[in-house]
């Protein structure tokens, strides 16, 4: 669809990102209300009254809202809610919008016959995601008992990588030869009510190659006897099935596409990625990025066992533990030296400040890489700017902290106590702290600005670099930088 053909309603579908604020939105209020209703129903005096109440709630509310509310219910309650949905269509919508934990909990209680019926009633792309939440043994049983034609189409979609365009696309779409008339297109659409109609009808040439599309508006306003070749428009953006979801999201977001065609090596149309699938991919990318930055692969679910959530977080924290032990061991090596007397007092300040500088730098770069703002051509310029910012922060905060430390010493706040050595003078302490902050902030900026690119180069998600790894390396690096600066200052003035 051309930019001029986009309607305001299509533009309004573009997801809006809110910056770090918990909004008391209408949907959030609805979720809280549904949870309150469901929890009250589950605690009724008798099971029959409880089931009647839950059945009434399931009939009164949208299955999409119920699917979101189910994530905050215990696993057993999710199955009860699903069983009380009024019909198969509501159950299908519920399962498509439910989270993987909810689907897994429900599948454990559903017989194979009901699962088959459910999968047959939903688009093949959604059925693939449903099957991903099953055990291998259950998956084989379901596929063997499924309609052979449906099973074949699902297996074809499953050949593609989980994070690829092949998994995001649907193989149910409308595509016609360019000589097909608008009236014939309308007849075919009416004859296939189960296939969802997007805002575009795709047009093929004599070799079944994708050559254009016809906007739905053009089908409505033109005469039925007009062939598609007269109203079609060229397609400028396509992807192959092995394209990454990041590439799909980048293309659809930049050009505001309502649907993205997926073609094979022969330029033949094999699938279409609808806008809704791109939105889901955006959410998944955002969740993965936030989890990596936080240093956990945890999929938040308040009913998840504590021990499992512990093991999700623990491996990442081992890096921080090792870094802390390394720093502690480093400090013990220099005990007893007169120049070392001020180091233990100021390492927390220097490590904390430089750590925040490094995290700010790496997090901003990860966000820029994820959004496509960083390219090969701009990488050097961006790193140079970040290094300049780090040097400026080091100079400003180094001088500021030096002045504060010097002033506190003059007022009697002496961390090392009375003595005759060089580091017992206010100027020496302030000067060393000033250099330490400058050196550690500069080094942490270099670390924070280069590690995301290093990780990306070796095939690891750059978001990993913004979490415990940068923090851990920075703590050790900041400690050693301050130790070395303190020693150099002592050699210069003693």
Image: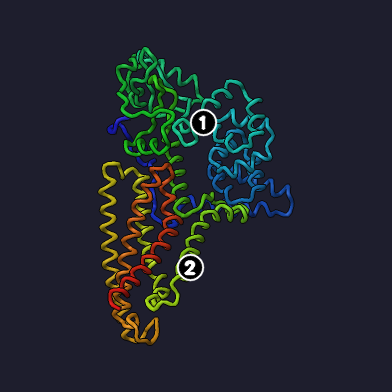
In the depicted view, which residue is nearer to us: 442 or 209?
442
Q: Quadrant of residue 208?
A: top left
**Residue 53 in view in this figure:** no
Among the two numbered marks 1 and 2 on one chain, the one whose residue lies closer to the N terminus? 1
In the depicted view, which residue is nearer to us: 34 or 22?
22
Q: Residues within 10 Å of mark 1 (few under 14, many from 20)?
A: many
Residue 117: percent from left, percent from top: 63, 29
**Residue 323 in view in this figure:** yes
In the depicted view, which residue is nearer to us: 487 or 49?
487
Mark 1 vs mark 2, foreground winner is 2
Q: CA distance from mark 1 to mark 2?
A: 53 Å
Q: Quadrant of residue 443?
A: bottom left
**Residue, x 31% and y 82% (percent of image)?**
426
Residue 251: percent from left, percent from top: 35, 35
Residue at label 1? 125
Secondary structure of residue under mark 2:
helix
**Residue, x 29% and y 17% (percent of image)?**
230
Residue 11 against residue 151 in the figure, above or below: below
Q: Residues within 10 Å of mark 2 (few under 14, many from 20)?
A: some
Residue 193: percent from left, percent from top: 50, 24
Label 1 with label 2: CB-CB less than 8 Å: no
Residue 328 disc label: 2
Residue 412 disc label: none
Question: Taking 16 as reference, is 87 left or right?
Answer: right
Residue 87 against residue 68 in the figure, above or below: above
Residue 227: percent from left, percent from top: 34, 15
**Residue, x 60% and y 37% (percent of image)?**
91
**Residue, x 62% and y 41% (percent of image)?**
104
Which quadrant is home to the C terminus?
bottom left
């Amino acid at each position: 669809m051309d930019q001029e053909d986009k309607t305001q309603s299509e533009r309004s579908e573009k997801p809006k990102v809110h910056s770090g604020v918990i909004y008391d939105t209408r949907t959030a209020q609805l979720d809280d209300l549904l949870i309150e209703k469901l929890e009250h129903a589950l605690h009724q005096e008798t099971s029959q009254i409880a089931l009647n109440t839950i059945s009434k709630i399931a009939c009164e509310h949208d299955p999409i809202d119920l699917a979101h509310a189910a994530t905050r219910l215990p696993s057993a309650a999710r199955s009860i809610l699903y069983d009380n949905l009024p019909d198969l269509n509501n159950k299908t919508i519920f399962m498509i919008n439910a989270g993987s934990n909810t689907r897994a909990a429900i599948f454990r209680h559903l017989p194979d016959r009901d699962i088959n019926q459910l999968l047959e009633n939903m688009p093949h792309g959604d059925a693939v995601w449903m099957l991903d939440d099953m055990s291998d043994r259950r998956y084989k049983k379901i596929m063997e008992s499924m309609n052979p034609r449906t099973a074949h189409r699902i297996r074809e979609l499953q050949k593609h990588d989980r994070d690829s365009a092949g998994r995001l696309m649907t193989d149910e779409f409308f595509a016609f030869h360019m000589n097909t008339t608008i009236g014939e297109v309308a007849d075919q659409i009416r004859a296939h009510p189960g296939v969802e109609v997007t805002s575009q009808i795709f047009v093929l040439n004599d070799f079944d190659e994708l050559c254009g599309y016809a906007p739905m508006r053009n089908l409505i306003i033109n005469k039925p006897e007009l062939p598609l070749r007269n109203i079609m428009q060229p397609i400028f953006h396509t992807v192959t099935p092995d394209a990454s979801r990041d590439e799909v999201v980048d293309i659809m977001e930049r050009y505001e596409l309502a649907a993205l065609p997926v073609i094979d090596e022969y330029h033949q149309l094999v699938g279409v990625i609808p806008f809704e699938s791109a939105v889901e991919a955006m959410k998944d990318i955002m969740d993965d990025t936030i989890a990596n930055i936080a240093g956990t692969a945890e999929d938040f679910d308040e009913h998840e066992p504590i021990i499992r959530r512990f093991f999700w977080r623990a491996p990442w924290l081992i890096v921080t533990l090792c870094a802390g032990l390394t720093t502690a061991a480093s400090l013990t090596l220099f005990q007893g030296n007169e120049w070392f007397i001020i180091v233990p007092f100021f390492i927390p300040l220097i490590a904390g400040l430089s750590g925040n500088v490094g995290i700010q730098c790496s997090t901003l770069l990860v966000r820029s890489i994820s959004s496509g703002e960083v390219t090969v051509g701009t990488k050097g310029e961006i790193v140079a700017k970040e290094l300049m910012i780090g040097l400026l922060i080091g100079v400003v905060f180094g001088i500021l902290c030096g002045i504060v430390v010097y002033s506190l010493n003059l007022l009697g706040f002496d961390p090392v106590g009375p003595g005759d050595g060089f580091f017992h003078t206010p100027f020496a302490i302030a000067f060393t702290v000033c250099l330490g902050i400058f050196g550690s902030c500069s080094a942490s900026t270099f670390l924070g600005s280069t590690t995301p690119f290093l990780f990306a180069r070796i095939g690891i998600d750059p978001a990993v670099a913004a979490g415990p790894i940068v923090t851990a390396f920075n703590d050790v690096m900041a400690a050693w930088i301050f130790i070395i600066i303190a020693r150099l200052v002592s050699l210069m003035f003693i």
